[in-house]
Image (spheres, rainbow, N blue to C red):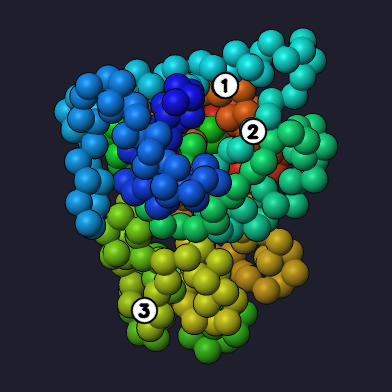
Amino acid sequence: MDRFDALLAFARVVEAGSFTKAAQTLHLSKTTVTQLVQQLEARLRVKLLHRTTRQVRVTPDGAAYYERVVRVLADLDDADTALSSATASPRGRLRVDVPTPFARLVLMPALPEFHARHPEIQLDMGVSDRIVDLIGDNVDAVLRGGEVTVPSLIARRIGELPLGVYAAPSYLDATGRPAHPRDIEADPQRIVGFLRASTGRIAPIEMRRGEESVEVRGRYVVAADDGNAYLAAGLAGMGVLWLPRYMAEPHAARGELVPLLEDWTMAPMPMYLAYPPNRNVSAKLRVFIDWVDELMRRHAPWIVPAAPGHDAE
């Protein structure tokens, strides 16, 4: 038994919750992964996993062993990178999940530059606005707008997204321009609803002007749980949008969206990069974080970098 291969196979089975999924991530057969874990259990004389026809669950002993194994694997990965040469680039597979608009407008256009800097990093980028199970989906980190609601994750605040209110000219021609946030709640005004992944509901928007504070809900005829689809509905004239400015300003500059209620403000949307607490920040994840930080600064003022001291929560 190759001990390293057995440890890696065990860790991936725990993270994926399946021998089949673990085998796919390791590019091995299911039989090989099963044999490696069985050999590890035989060597330790401990049952690490409970197996049924439908799922794989880690035992209490297996959970405790997993916590140590992932630290060892991360340390080995970093040691290999550090010792390969003083100038070696970080290398290996990095699995991240990012929001659809941020990927399309910010990350994807800059990927050639990232690859030129770090040609030995294989970046597997999931693009979605869904809630990602970092362990079950075997993801190294997620980038998300909004507060991180999973207390077990380490979340680094990397910036803020200033928000604005917008609508398409075709919509305003049909309904008139709202002069106050309350107008958006009255006929014939409507909004495009954004369905939160965590609740499946549309959250109200709080807007402020001086001492006045208004919570706006509005009526909708279409709602979406994807940022790109949400924006597309607004561009089609389906209602008022609350958008991060980095998404809206290119369309506003072309006259496709009109800024509304510009004397009112909203709290900016925080941006976080989150990862499991049982994984060290590897060299490849560190350079990805640094690259995202750089992109945040490059897109100012529509994206505001985090101030010093917001490194982790």
Residue carrying label 2? 92
User: What is the x, y in percent for residue 281?
Assistant: 51, 23
Instruction: Report if the CB atoms under discs 2 and 1 are less than 8 Å apart.
Output: yes
What crowding class fits label 1: few (fewer than 14 Cα within 10 Å), some (14-19), or many (20 or more)?
A: some
Q: CA distance from mark 2 to mark 1?
A: 9 Å
Q: Secondary structure at mark 3?
A: strand
Q: How many marks?
A: 3
Disc number for residue 9: none
Residue carrying label 3? 220
Reading the chain from its start, which is encountered first: label 3 or label 2?
Answer: 2
Instruction: Report if the CB atoms under discs 3 and 2 are less than 8 Å apart.
Output: no
Q: Is residue 220 visible?
A: yes
In the rendered image, which quarter is residue 85 located in?
top right
Residue carrying label 1? 77
In the picture as drawn, the residue positioned furthest to the left comes out as 60
Residue at 52% across / 77% down in the picture?
233
Q: Is residue 106 left or right of residue 94?
A: right
Disc 3 vs disc 2: which is toward the camera? 2
Q: Is residue 78 left or right of residue 109?
A: left
